[in-house]
Amino acid sequence: MWQSDHVGKGSAFKADARGAHKEETLDGDSLMEKYELKEKVKYLWNGIGHDYSVIPQKCYDSCSFKSICRVTDELKEEAEGG
């Protein structure tokens, strides 16, 4: 959500006018209601705290996250059915 004066070339936040969703008013209660943010936050919060599995368990040589990847050799074998 961006106010109109924060979008475009002169923006301090570099918000692109093509991809930015502009709102003329940033009244918190109105935005919460309009976009059903309380319900969305509850939905996300309930879904976050339960599953920390690493999916997919396929590793590619081109992956840029190899140095921090949590997929262990055991998980790779398990994924391959071994």
Image (cartoon, rainbow, N blue to C red):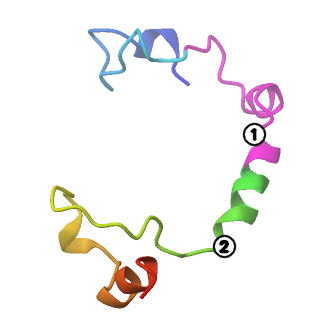
Q: Is residue 69 above or below residue 11?
A: below
Residue situated in front as seen by the camera: 41 or 58: 58
Split into 4 quadrants, where in the image is the N terminus?
A: top right
Q: Is residue 72 above or below residue 57?
A: below
The residue indicated by pointer 1 is: 37
Tag 1: residue type? Leu
**For residue 38, what is the image quadrant?**
top right
Residue 7 in the image: x percent, y percent?
40, 13
Q: Is residue 75 above or below residue 6?
A: below
Q: Residues within 10 Å of mark 2 (few under 14, many from 20)?
A: few
- Label 1 element class: helix
The residue indicated by pointer 2 is: 49
Q: Which residues are magenta?
A: 22-40
Identified at 36% across, 20% down, the residue is 15
Residue 67 in the image: x percent, y percent?
18, 72
The CA distance from mark 1 to mark 2 is: 19 Å
